[in-house]
Structure formats: C-alpha cells, structure tokens
C-alpha cells in the first residue's frame, strides 16, 4: 500500500517493515487504491519519496550507507520505475526516528527495500503522467516518461519538478501505478557506477570527522592497558598546562582530553599520569581461552554403527572489524536537549542509549545518521556516541570524539573466538550422519552471547539451507552449542557465525571426499540438495578450470555457501611453496542472489568478501595476552594488503530470477573455506587453527 503525504509537492510514502494499519491517519480497508489514503502525519515507519520543484527525486533512506552501495541500489530502483535520470535521484540518510525499523544488517537492506521503493516510484510516475495529461488535455495513455520528464504528443515536455505540485493533488491516476515487469527493466540489473563514487574520491563525501558544529572541539581518550581496566587516580596538571587544552574529563572507559586540535588532544593525552586497576581478564591469555572453549564444546555422541568417521577440531581467533574510518562521534549535550552526528546501523537504539547516558528523555535527543567508511558489523554498536555524550555533558560544550586505530583494535568490539568439533560418518560410499558442535565466547557483562543456540541450530551441516535438512544430503544432521563467558567486548562480525562454521564444515567436506576417493567438486555435485548451489559450483569450476595442472606447492580449493535467500561458490588458487607465507593468486566466485539490482556492486561485495576470507584464514587475528589485546594497528593486525590480494579475480552473477536476496555477507564463508582447502591441498596438511599463522 502506498500513501499520499500532505505536502505542496508530490510526496508519497510506503510502509517499511511494519503493519500498514499503523501509519498515522490511515485506516485499513479492502485493498484501497494508492491515491485513496491521505496521511497528514510524519514519515515515521515509512519510506518517503518527494519530487521537488527543482526536479530532484529525494528518498530519505532509513538505512545506513557504509560503503556497501545501498544508496546506489535504491537510486536505481527509483530511477527504473520513475524513468528518471539516476543523477536526478538523491538518497540522503534519515535521522533516527521514533518508530519503525532503521536496522541495517543481516544482508537484508536491498531485499527489504525492493518492493516499497519500486511501488513508491511507480505511483509517483502514474501521478506525474496524470498531471501532465490534465495540463495538456490529452489522453494519459499518449504520454511517456524519460529522463525525469513527461513527453507528450508533438515532442512537448514537462519536467517532473514542474508537475510536482499539481501531481500532489491527484487522488486517482489515469494510468497504471504498478511497478514494471522485470522484462522491461532498463536500469535494474545493469552494472552501474556508484552514485557517490566521485564524492568519495574527491573528498566531497562527508563523514562524522567532517562535521562542523559551532564551538565543537576535538577529543580523544586515554584508555587502560588491559581490557576494561579502571582509573584509580589521575594527575592531569601537566596535560592541562599544555597549549590548546580545554578540558580533561573522566569517563568509565578512561580519561578524555578536549582540545583545540587533535594534535593538541593527543599530546595532552600522552601527558596524563594515570594509575590503572587491571581489567577483569588480567592474567588470561590465548592458551587458557582456547582450553576453556575446547572443554565447553558438547560431546558428539555415538556415530552410526558400522560407519567410518572423518572428524576434526577447529579453532578461530578473535578478529577486529577494523573499518578504515575509525569510530567518530560529534555530541552537543545541553541542559534540556542533545544533538549527535555519527554513523550507526542502529540509530533508534543509539538515540535511546545516549539519552539514557545523559539523563534526557529520548524525545529531547536528535541523532543525525552519517555515512560510514566501512563497518562489517562494527557500527551496530555505538560505544563512541555514548562516550561523546558523557564528555560533552561534563565539559559543557560540543565535542568531536575520535577513537584511534589502537583504541578500536584493543578496546573495541571483535568477533568472538570459537572452537568447533565436527564428525562426518560415511558408510557404503555416502555420508549417513553429520554432527557439528561448537563453543563460542559470549560477553558476560551484557549477559548475552553473540551466537545463540537457536541461530546455531539453523546453520548445522553447511546451513542454513531451504529446509532444516541441511545444504548437503548428509543423512542425520545434529549438533549442539556451548560457550564461555568473558568480560570482553564482542560484536557481530561480517557473516556472524557462518564465517567460522561454514569454513570448518567445508574443510570436512573436502576431507570426506578424499576419504571416499572422490574429487572435491564432483562429491559436492552429488550431495548438494539445491540446484542453484550446484549451478554456482559448476560455474566456478568451469570458469576457474578446476583440476588444471599446477606446479608443486600450488593448489586449488573450492567451497559453497547458502544464506539470505542467495547462494555462492568460490574457487581459490594458492601459492604455498613457502607454507609460512602463502599467497592466494586467483579467486573465482559465482553468486545467485535472485535479482542483482546492481551487478557491479555485487561484484565489489564479492571481491571484499574474498579479501576477508584471505585475511582471516591466513594471517589476521587478535591475541589476548594477560588481559590485553596484543595487536594495536594494521602493522600487527595483518589484514590483507595489495601484495596479498589475488593477482586475478573474477565474479560471475547468475541470471536474474525472482526478487533480490542478500549479498553483503554472503561470500565470506565460501571464500574462507576455499582458501583453507586450497592451502590444505597445496601443503598436504590439515589446517585446524585460524588464522594459520597463530
């Protein structure tokens, strides 16, 4: 259902992630026409489209752009249905709302917006055409739309902007307001350059660090040497005596310095003399965590009688999100109101949290959502915003808080470490049972784990799959989940639990194939349940020349994954002639996401997931040493750089069918599994601890 909003220009809205009956002023009825309902309230819970007098189409997006290209995808949907130039479509980010769903995560943004965005634009097009027909007194069917204008008989034209005011008054359209059939798409499905590409490379794009507010001052925080250590005492006399220092403020996470520049702030921070109490993990290191995780993994039970077992235990380290743009938040907290600017995937929850932190009602707090320079799940949490709120209130002025890279890696959120125990039982040439049990670290201070048992069960045996029977035809599927609690900051990391669970399972699938004397690709072909997964596997096997002759120390590996209504396969080639310094030389990926709105964006997503897989399998992880994270920057948190990237990368997008599925997190498990399997084959080893250099 699409609603009209009372406005002087054409402004319409579609409910997004809510029951249409909750739209203010709307009364549910038996499928009313789009023009029948006038909403005089706000755009809460809605996706809203406005055609401005300046001939711009504006859709304020209740999702976050962090580099994944969602603004481009939505602009393409709007341009498609409106027959507008994509350059005339603006997709600003919506401020935090009071109702509805503004959550960005779970690879569901494109799929959740695909219907509402197209319905909005199709309705707007019908009203604009009707307005032009009335103005020119011609049949609406004789008109067509192109390049953000209506074209009439004899070549006369009218821009959408010039028709917007009259279109706003129309309640019944003279032409269909249904979205186009896919066969008529000219924009959706065509590789398109990001609408913000030029702004990003020229520096025009604005991030939290670029925000200017009257009186705002740069701010940094001195943090403890151990995770969640506490300030015992602080001598700030030397710091306060330095030029440019405006305030020194104690907060739960450390001691903040507010200054005239970040240079002055860092200089003063280093001049602070702080006595720290060790954090709750002091004395705890990796070996103890691994031992506790292993002990927490539930037993696998008894295998089927007469079966042969292929089994393995797998360890995955903590991993930092490490987005290129470090956490930054601008806060202006006053006595009776507050205003914030930062990048957040959960703006409504963030608003409530900062309001509570400074003792204000949520209605007195405004949160402006800004684009982020990467996230991978990190901006689901709003640590920096809460700190900025406390500092601003204590200092009595607006502050721009920036976490350093060291702050985020040593004190920020991370993917939890985990231990997996897997057993595949085969008999008479086929797998008759598959069991996967695991244990993960959960965050005791928040009383909840990152991986819960229900979510885990949904992913058992190379899942999740279309049914509870698993991705592979492996007979009886079972498993269980355990965990240990630590006072350590954890957060959802790209692909969440699938990135570790699938990697371990795909290694076991390779080992089962070897145990049965079968080729790894052919074995998957004969056991995969889903035809779409088989198709992407066949695509990478053909495009990547699976089985081709390679020099000693070189090998190929494959893996598949299915999730978010999509599926993917990856083939990786590796040079492991020096096993301690392997290099992935080639990656071929194929994805079936239903309908790829922007194939170029999908290819970029897959490329990013390939780098994630290379990094977390080969070299990137965090060590815990006596309650402190050892790594502190990209100098020792070894994320893949250009010299580690594959020399050849190609991505294949399968033919479109149906509506879009998810893609942002899809490729990580397949890429990780393929790299691990390639390394195993090249070295003749069975990798069990990741990253391999730990």
Image: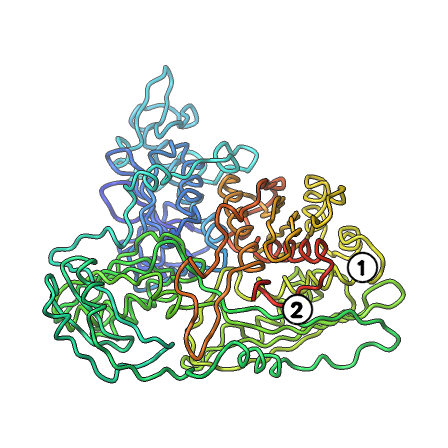
In the rendered image, which residue does mark 1 sit on? 514
Residue 47 seen in the figure? yes
Percent across and percent down for residue 122 are 42, 39
Q: Is residue 469 left or right of residue 80?
A: right
Circles 2 and 1 in contact, beta carbons < 8 Å: no
In the rendered image, which residue does mark 2 sit on? 460
Measuring 23% from the left and 68% from the top, which residue is drawn there? 270
Percent across and percent down for residue 58 are 31, 42
Residue 214 has which mark? Answer: none
Quarter occupied by the C terminus? bottom right
49, above or below 258, in the image: above
In this view, the mark in front (2 or 1): 1
Percent across and percent down for residue 334 are 13, 68
Within-10-Å neighbours for mark 1: few <14, some 14–19, many 20+ = some
> Which sits earlier in the primary sequence, circle 2 or circle 1?
2
Residue at disc 1, secondary structure: helix
Gap between marks 2 and 1 measured at Cα: 22 Å
Residue 17 seen in the figure? no
Percent across and percent down for residue 190 are 51, 34
Measuring 53% from the left and 37% from the top, which residue is drawn there? 189
Name the image quarter holding residue 23.
bottom left
């Amino acid at each position: 259902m699409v609603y009209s909003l009372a406005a002087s220009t054409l402004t319409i809205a579609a409910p997004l992630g809510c029951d249409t009956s909750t739209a203010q002023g709307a009364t549910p009825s038996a499928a009313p026409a789009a023009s029948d309902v006038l909403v005089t309230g706000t755009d809460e819970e809605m996706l809203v489209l406005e055609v401005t007098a300046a001939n711009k189409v504006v859709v304020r997006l209740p999702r976050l752009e962090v580099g994944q290209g969602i603004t481009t995808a939505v602009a393409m949907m709007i341009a498609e249905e409106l027959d507008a130039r994509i350059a005339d479509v603006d997709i600003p980010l919506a401020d935090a709302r009071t109702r509805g769903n503004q959550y960005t995560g779970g690879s569901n943004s494109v799929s959740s917006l695909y219907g509402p965005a197209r319905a909005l634009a199709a309705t707007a097009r019908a009203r604009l055409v009707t307005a032009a027909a009335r103005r020119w007194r011609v049949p609406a069917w004789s008109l067509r739309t192109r390049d953000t204008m209506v074209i009439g008989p004899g070549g006369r034209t009218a821009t959408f902007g010039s028709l917007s005011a009259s279109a706003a008054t129309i309640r019944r359209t003279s032409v269909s307001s249904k979205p186009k059939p896919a066969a008529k798409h000219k924009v959706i499905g065509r590789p398109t350059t990001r609408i913000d590409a030029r702004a990003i490379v020229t520096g025009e794009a604005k991030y939290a660090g670029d925000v200017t507010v009257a009186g705002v001052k740069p701010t940094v925080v001195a943090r403890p040497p151990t995770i969640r250590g506490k300030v015992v005492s602080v001598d700030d006399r030397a710091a306060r005596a330095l030029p440019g220092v405006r305030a020194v403020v104690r907060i739960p996470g450390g001691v903040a310095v507010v200054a005239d520049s970040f240079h002055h702030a860092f200089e003063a921070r280093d001049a602070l003399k702080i006595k720290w109490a060790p954090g709750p993990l002091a004395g705890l290191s990796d070996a103890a965590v691994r031992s506790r995780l292993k002990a927490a993994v539930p037993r696998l039970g008894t295998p089927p009688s007469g079966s042969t077992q292929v089994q393995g235990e797998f360890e995955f380290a903590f991993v930092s999100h490490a987005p290129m743009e470090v956490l930054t938040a601008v806060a202006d907290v006053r006595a009776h109101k507050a205003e914030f600017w930062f990048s957040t995937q959960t703006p409504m929850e963030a608003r409530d949290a900062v309001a509570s932190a400074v003792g204000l009602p949520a209605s007195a707090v405004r949160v402006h959502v800004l684009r982020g320079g990467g996230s991978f799940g990190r901006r689901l949490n709003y640590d920096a915003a809460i700190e900025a709120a406390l500092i601003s209130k204590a200092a009595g002025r607006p502050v721009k808080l920036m976490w350093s890279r060291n702050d985020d890696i040593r004190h920020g959120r991370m993917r939890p470490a985990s231990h997996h125990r897997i057993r595949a039982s085969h008999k008479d040439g086929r797998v008759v049972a598959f069991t996967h049990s695991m244990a993960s670290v959960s965050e005791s201070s928040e009383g909840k784990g990152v991986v819960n048992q229900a979510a885990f069960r949904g992913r058992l045996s190379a899942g999740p799959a279309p049914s509870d029977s698993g991705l592979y035809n492996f007979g009886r599927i079972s498993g269980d989940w355990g965990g240990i609690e630590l006072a350590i900051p954890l957060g959802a990391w790209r692909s969440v639990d699938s990135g570790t669970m699938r990697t371990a399972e795909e290694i076991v699938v390779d080992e089962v194939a070897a145990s049965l004397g079968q080729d790894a690709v052919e074995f998957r072909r004969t056991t995969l349940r889903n035809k779409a997964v088989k198709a992407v596997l066949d695509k990478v096997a053909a495009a990547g020349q699976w089985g081709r002759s390679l020099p000693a120390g070189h090998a190929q590996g494959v893996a598949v994954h299915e999730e978010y209504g999509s599926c993917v396969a990856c083939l990786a080639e590796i040079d492991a002639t020096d096993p301690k310094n392997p290099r992935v030389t080639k990656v071929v990926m194929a994805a079936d996401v239903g309908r790829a709105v922007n194939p170029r964006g999908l290819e970029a997503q897959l490329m990013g997931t390939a780098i994630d897989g290379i990094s977390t399998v080969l070299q990137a992880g965090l060590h815990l040493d006596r309650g402190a994270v050892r790594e502190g920057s990209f100098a020792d948190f070894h994320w893949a750089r250009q010299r580690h990237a594959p020399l050849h990368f190609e991505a294949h997008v399968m033919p479109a069918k149906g509506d879009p599925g998810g893609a942002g997190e899809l490729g990580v498990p397949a890429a990780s599994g393929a790299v691990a399997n390639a390394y195993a084959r090249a070295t003749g080893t069975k990798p069990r601890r990741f990253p391999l250099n730990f």
